Image (spheres, grey):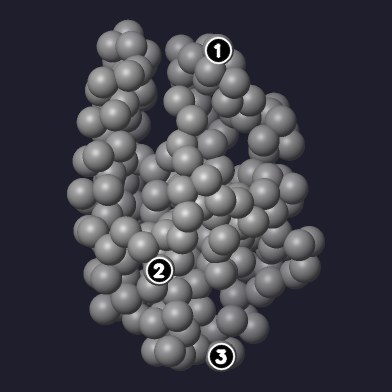
Amino acid sequence: MKWRSLAESGSYSDMRPLREIFAERKDAIAKYVPADVQAVHDRTVAWLKAQGLAAQALSLFKVGAPSPAFELLDHNGLPVSSADLLGEGRLVVLFIRGRWCPFCVGQMEAMNYIVAEVEAAGASLVAVSPQTEKQAFFMRDQHKLAFPLLVDAGNQLARQFGLVYRVPEEQQGLYRNTFVNLPFVNGDSSWELPIPATFVLDRDGTILFASANEDYTDRPEPLEILSAV
């Protein structure tokens, strides 16, 4: 399935709640994606939920807990550190899977719509994924994103947050058949991804807002994140 880019669809101005935008995409998937393919994704989400990955991460990195410090390269290969960002104000950190995921794209476009308000509140916003610098550059350029996309090579930061899992063999086969080449996109053969998660950090690194979900189609609303900032 090909998801339209901003270049193809014009300026992004969809102010609906993210849940409505995602519901529309899920309806399209239900209509056009074969049931057996959908079942593979559903089984993966159910398996992840059974592992309790999100609950474990949020038990360690809940509101009031300290967050790990980091320094990662951005989409232009420039270093970005949490210390520098937090020196200027609060920080929103979004963990996403990559530019190949339509729900990651939808979330990034929705967050892009409020990034000016986040900055007006004295905060900054970054998205973190395991995709390579080139893939991060392409994603930011294609969707006209106004915030940095950080490269978490080998999911090192996501692993510190307890968000990382290895894609099951069944889903690996499906991705290969649908041209989602994770070893190419991420630059390694681990087949590891983070579950989507959002953290808002105070200037001292304390967590003010935390969300993680094994279901990649369920993410916090941008206005909910903005209110935490």
> 10 Å neighbourhood of mark 1: few (<14), some, or many (≥20)?
few
Q: Position of residue 150 (x, y in %)?
A: 63, 60
Residue drawn at 54 percent across, 84 percent down: 86
In the depicted view, which residue is nearer to us: 110 or 50? 110
Whichever of labels 1 and 2 marks the residue nearer the N terminus, that label is 2
- Asked which secondary structure carries label 3, the reply is loop
Which of the two discs, 1 and 2, sits closer to the camera?
2
Based on the displayed image, in which of its 4 quarters is residue 199 positioned? bottom left
Q: Which residue is mark 2?
A: 113
Q: In this rendering, does residue 135 appear at all?
A: yes
Question: Across the whole image, how many numbered discs are drawn on residues?
Answer: 3
Based on the displayed image, in which of its 4 quarters is residue 109 positioned? bottom left
Looking at the rendered structure, the kind of residue marked 2 is: Tyr
Whichever of labels 2 and 3 marks the residue nearer the N terminus, that label is 3
Point out the image quarter for the N terminus: top left
> 10 Å neighbourhood of mark 2: few (<14), some, or many (≥20)?
some
Q: Which residue is mark 1?
A: 177
Tell me: 82 left or right of 35: right
- Asked which secondary structure carries label 2, the reply is helix
In the depicted view, which residue is nearer to us: 47 or 172? 172
Residue drawn at 58 percent across, 90 percent down: 87
Can you say whether 47 is above or below 16 in the image? above
Q: In this rendering, does residue 94 appear at all?
A: no
Q: Position of residue 165 (x, y in %)?
A: 48, 35
Pointers 3 and 1 in contact (C-beta within 8 Å): no
Can you say whether 55 is above or below 30 in the image? below
Looking at the rendered structure, the kind of residue marked 1 is: Asn
